[in-house]
Image (cartoon, grey):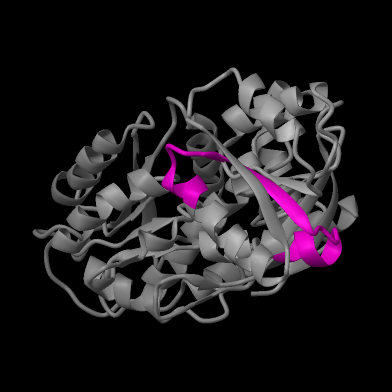
Amino acid sequence: MNTTQPILRRVCVGLIAAALGLSLAGCGTNTDPGSNEGTDTIKIGVNYEQSGAVATYGSDSVDGIMMAVDEVNAAGGINGKQVEIVKYDTKSDTAEATTLATKLMVQDKVVAILGPATSGSFMATIPVANQNKVPVVSGSATADKVTVSDSGVQEYAFRTCFNDSFQGTAMANYASKTLDAKSAIIIKDNSSDYAKGLAENFTATFTAHGGTIVGEEAYVAGDTDFNAILTRARGLEFDVVYLPGYYQEAGLIIKAARELGINQPILGPDGFDSPDLLNLGGADALNNVFFTNHYSSLDEDPKVIEFIAAFQAKYSKEPNAFNALGYDTANFVFDAVSRATEANGEAIKDALASTKNFPAVTGTLSVDENHNPIKAIVVIGLENGIQASSEKISS
């Protein structure tokens, strides 16, 4: 396998160069937000959580983004222009994310912004994106209402990840059909719209299959003592635990649950995908654990194999889903820029919306009418905290 990787990578770079070799129409000066007309570079903003509570999501996404940037620039850039990244750290703070998005659009005059990673912070940047006509794209903001508000589709907001409706539904289907579960208990982060949306969709689908939710317990982000809720849960009879939330609390909950003798399968979302889940939960506890995700390193798709080899060569570690999503999100935007009729946010927004069959590492995607990707989802099984199985489920 190692001997084929250089060949695969040359082919991949060649394809990117060809795809981005299309010409942009239009001319002028760069006087408005979201326009790079008349400049020598394509300026793209990176607005991610690189410190703070969810720094691993943002930092991992940025690693993938920067690898994509290096590849496209080495291949000649976009329409002969090099990609120039303007990068800021939101510090995992929603207000900071909005401030920086505004700065990127108005002061730095980027044509598109990648990030933030989390749904709340990403949604906070959408009003300024719509106001300044600069598209914002997230690789991991999964909340249902990210791209569609009460007033309709958010014109300048896009994502390359599936949404929570699909994620909660897919895990409920897996629990019912693959694990043959008839009853479940839900333990959710009650401070998170992400977790509440996942729980709602899991419940709707699981009960539609004839399953029963025997109990529901809640915690809030930052909690560290879960003995009370787990003791109550232990007194119930159930086939599976659904634990929608992020790795910080999930790792501690799984460890405590196993110590209390709760050995049923524990199911979760993409928020489990962090090296810190293993650090917090411990290898012994992380068995019979399954979670929905965007990508698995076990996938034998040639695009995945090529990506893993290139990422390992650059960063000396195996990529996780956030690395892959960052990489895909950057290339998704590069592809749209290459097809846009002008080098400005409005034209790039139209190109993003018209994307069909884009060959991403996390699955070939097309953009639907709600600016969501039509793509597959993966259910990953852990053994001793390590990925041991993956099953791809089509949308």
Quick check: 199 left or right of 53? right
The spot of residue 78 in percent (x, y) is 41, 65
Query: Residue at point 31% right, 78% down?
Result: 350
The spot of residue 392 in percent (x, y) is 76, 66
Query: Residue at point 81% right, 21% down?
Result: 259
Q: Is residue 179 magenta?
A: yes
Residue in front for this viewpoint, 311 or 208: 208
The quadrant holding residue 323 is top right
Q: Is residue 145 magenta?
A: no
Camera sees residue 163: no
Quick check: 68 left or right of 258? left
User: Most extreme residue toward the top, as rendered?
Assistant: 225
Residue in front for this viewpoint, 393 or 309: 393
Which range is magenta? 173-196
User: Most extreme residue toward the left, as rendered?
Assistant: 31
Query: Residue at point 57% right, 73% down?
Result: 365
The spot of residue 148 in percent (x, y) is 33, 68
Quick check: 69 left or right of 383? left
Image height of 112 relative to 190, above or below: below
